[in-house]
Amino acid sequence: MSSTVSPQFWGLLRRRTCWLPTLRGWLLLLLLFGPLLVFGFRNADAFLAVNDPVPNGVLVVEGWSPDYALETARSDAQRNPDHKLYVIGGPLEQGAPLSEYKTYAELGAATLRQMGMSNDAVQAVPAPYVRKDRTYAAAVALRDWFRQHGGVPQAVNLISMGAHARRSRLMFEEAFGSGRRVGIINVADRDYDSRQWWKSSQGVRSVLDELIAYGYARFLFFPSAEQRP
């Protein structure tokens, strides 16, 4: 005689009633939250591409930035001649054996000098190779460089590109600690129209990639003990 399994599966499971919206309910939810979703979608780039400099901040630029962003950094630095412009970045990802510059920090600094900046006005601060969290590693390298050369400044203005800006500021805030202010000077990405980013493949890739990366950085990023401020 075959045995039968009890409805409760030996006390391991129980049946629960689950309420689900009807078609009318789904339509009501769509009417209520649809406009909010559309608004958030259309303004995703504006959220990520934050522009919020702080007064008297030391200027920092990411060395991998295109020439027009470095030109913006040069112009901003010339308005503050008493401060150096710090260029950050890790090892080159392509063409390093053909170049005398092995990091984006050194390449960006050399480009700025070719644009007319003096050697004393530009300081390259290379970061080591890391498999992930490269922006945070660059921020930590800069923080440690400051500690070895007179102390960490109270305020930093990071010059960053488009949708990358908000995540970059978050990583710098994590690296420099709550006692320092981190501002952002945003340079618009010329590869797509930020007002209609969803109409180009480059805009979709940039914005969606940065949304995912920012979510990771905000909720899932935990620096190691030796990297914390």
Image: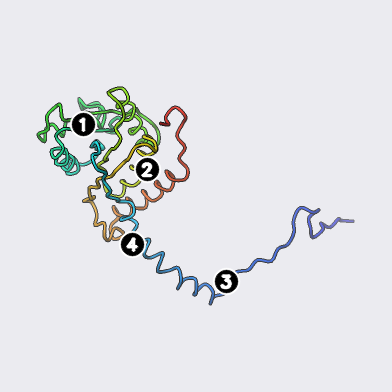
Residue 79 located left or right of residue 145: left
Question: How dense is the environment of label 4, judged by Cα within 10 Å: few (below 14), some, or many (20 and up)?
Answer: some
* Pair 1/4: label in front: 4
> In the image, residue 135 lies at what x, y percent?
34, 37
Question: How dense is the environment of label 2, judged by Cα within 10 Å: few (below 14), some, or many (20 and up)?
Answer: some
Residue 107: mark in rendering: 1
Amino acid on which disc 1 is placed: Leu
State which tag comes first along the sequence, 1 or 4: 4
Which residue appears farthest toward the left when viewing the image? 116
Depth order, front residue of 130/153: 153
State which tag comes first along the sequence, 2 or 4: 4
State which tag comes first along the sequence, 3 or 2: 3
Q: Secondary structure at mark 2?
A: helix
Q: Secondary structure at mark 1?
A: helix
Report which residue position mark 2 lands on. Answer: 170
Amino acid on which disc 3 is placed: Pro
Report which residue position mark 3 lands on. Answer: 21
Reply above or below: 52 against 197. Answer: above
State which tag comes first along the sequence, 3 or 4: 3
State which tag comes first along the sequence, 2 or 1: 1
Task: Give the quadrant of the N terminus.
Answer: bottom right
Q: What residue is at 49 percent from the left and 74 percent from the top?
A: 28
* Pair 2/4: label in front: 2
Q: Secondary structure at mark 3?
A: loop
Amino acid on which disc 2 is placed: Leu
Residue 42: mark in rendering: 4
Which residue appears farthest toward the top when viewing the image? 148
Residue 135: mark in rendering: none
Rounded to the nearest angstrom, the CA distance separating label 1 from label 4 is 35 Å
